[in-house]
Amino acid sequence: MGHRLDRPLSGQESKALEVPALTRLEDFETWAKHKHRASTGLFAPGDDLYERLLRLQPLQRKDSDAHPLRVLTAHTNYAKHREPSLSVTRVAQVTRDSDLTRKPMDSLEIMKVGKVLASVPLGTRELFSIWPEVAVQRPHTGQWLTLMKDVGEIVDWVRTIALPILIMGRTDLPRIPPQLNIDVAYDSTDAAWRAAGEIPAAKVMQNAIGAAGLRVSMLDMLVLTYGEGSRDAFRRWFVAMDDATVMARVWPVLDAATRQNHGRYALAIAEWAEEAGVDTSDVG
């Protein structure tokens, strides 16, 4: 702001600077006309900052309550003036391990008290995975949403939309990387940018949860094929693989198996056995 004005901001002007989150155009116009903003001469209709902030307002969406800026403002105001946002952990999905890919990983079937989680015929052995969901309540609507997904959408919007528009007035720019190790010192901004990762935190967590389940499920399936003696070798092989790699390599193969694509499954596990150093000479 100071470089645009070519003078220091007054104390009152500094306090009046903010990013509003408004659902009506007339409210935004009133906000811009506030005397301590108007005094800067930067917030009149047609001015650069006015137009950039207007583009980011929830009023630009039909469902303004779902706009990331509206959600972010609701959570921060609730935390500042009332109490922390409400959250709860609940069972969101129960799946048969033999049918793991029939439902999307993020599909929700919220279990209520008294509901049967799963059932199998008497005498049948079946493995199930129980997927928990940490949900957060949006203060302004009362909706319960998956915390990781709700926060992830806000972060992506800030990184890909809000900051580029506020700083440069456009979004057709190199995307700001979502992942940076702040425990490490960097020689320059360019060095930090080059070292940054491309996987958002929400995806990192999704991979961690999914890979933990896949390692267990797939290990049991591999042992059924190659025998109990292969368990340690396959376990070491899985442990050496990061979560994103497990999701990328194992999930499609497990999907192929549940869809009766036995050829693809057989080729993949044979390759894995070779990589893991499993003796396959006794496998028929």
Image (cartoon, rainbow, N blue to C red):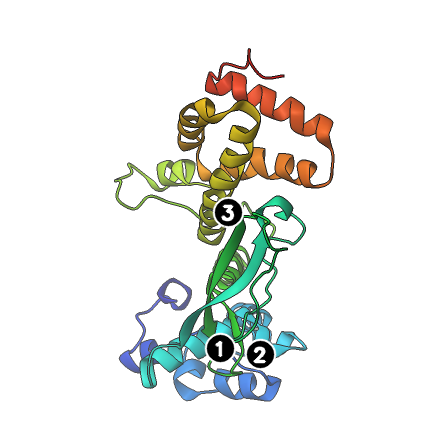
Frontmost of labels 2 and 1 is 1
> For the residue marked with disc 3, what is the amino acid?
Gly
Residue 221 placement, left or right of 8: right
Judging depth in this view, the residue of 231 and 197 nearest the camera is 231
Residue 140 percent coordinates (x, y): 50, 83
Inter-mark Cα distance, 1 to 3: 26 Å
Label 3: which residue?
Answer: 210
Q: Could you tell me which secondary element the residue under label 2 belongs to?
A: helix
Q: Nearer the viewer, mark 1 or mark 3?
A: 3
Percent across and percent down for residue 97 are: 57, 47
Which label was assigned to residue 138?
1
Q: CA distance from mark 2 to mark 1?
A: 10 Å
Helix, strand or loop status at disc 1: loop
**Which label lies toward us, 3 or 2?**
3
**Residue type at the position of mark 2:** Asp
- In the displayed orientation, state which residue is furthest to the front: 123
Task: Tell me: 224 left or right of 99.
Answer: left
Residue position marked by numbered label 2 in the rendering: 65
Q: Do labels 2 and 1 touch, CB within 8 Å?
A: yes
Residue in the foreground of this view, choosing between 26 and 192: 192
**Whether residue 257 is situated above or below residue 76 in the rendered picture:** above
Say what secondary structure mark 3 lies in.
helix
Q: Residues within 10 Å of mark 1 (few under 14, many from 20)?
A: many
Contact (Cβ within 8 Å) of mark 1 with mark 3: no
* Residue at left offset 65%, top offset 54%: 103
